[in-house]
Amino acid sequence: MGKENKICSHDHHSIIPVLVILIAISFLLQYQGILAENAVNIIWPILLGIGGMVKLVEDKCNCC
């Protein structure tokens, strides 16, 4: 039996999609005029950096 049948419930698999959604929401809020452009210019690189650091330090689980 291969790894393709396993379903992983580890949290590290959901971090990157959550960060992408937060980046998208920040751009949408800026487009709607709710969030200032300067704030978006600060937020998205921070979220992207957090995602990169998570990928660097995460432990590989048996499902991947």
Image: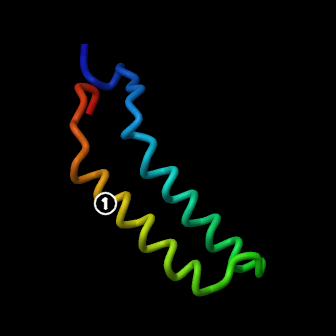
Query: Would you say 19 lies left or right of 59 here?
Result: right
Location of residue 12 in the rendering, given as x and y in whole percent from the top left corner? 37, 40
Location of residue 43 in the rendering, given as x and y in whole percent from the top left corner? 51, 72
Query: For residue 63, which quarter of the picture?
Result: top left
16 or 64: nearer the viewer? 16
**Image quarter of the C terminus:** top left
Asked if 48 appears above or below 5 in the picture, the reply is below
Location of residue 44 in the rendering, given as x and y in whole percent from the top left corner? 49, 72
Query: For residue 8, which quarter of the picture?
Result: top left
Query: For residue 40, which quarter of the picture?
Result: bottom right
Asked if 64 appears above or below 55 in the picture, the reply is above
Location of residue 37 in the rendering, given as x and y in whole percent from the top left corner? 62, 86
Query: Would you say 28 lies left or right of 59 here?
Result: right
Q: Secondary structure at mark 1?
A: helix
Q: Which residue is mark 1?
A: 52
| Residue at point 27%, 23% (across, down) | 3
**Three-letter amino acid code at disc 1?**
Gly
**Image quarter of the N terminus:** top left
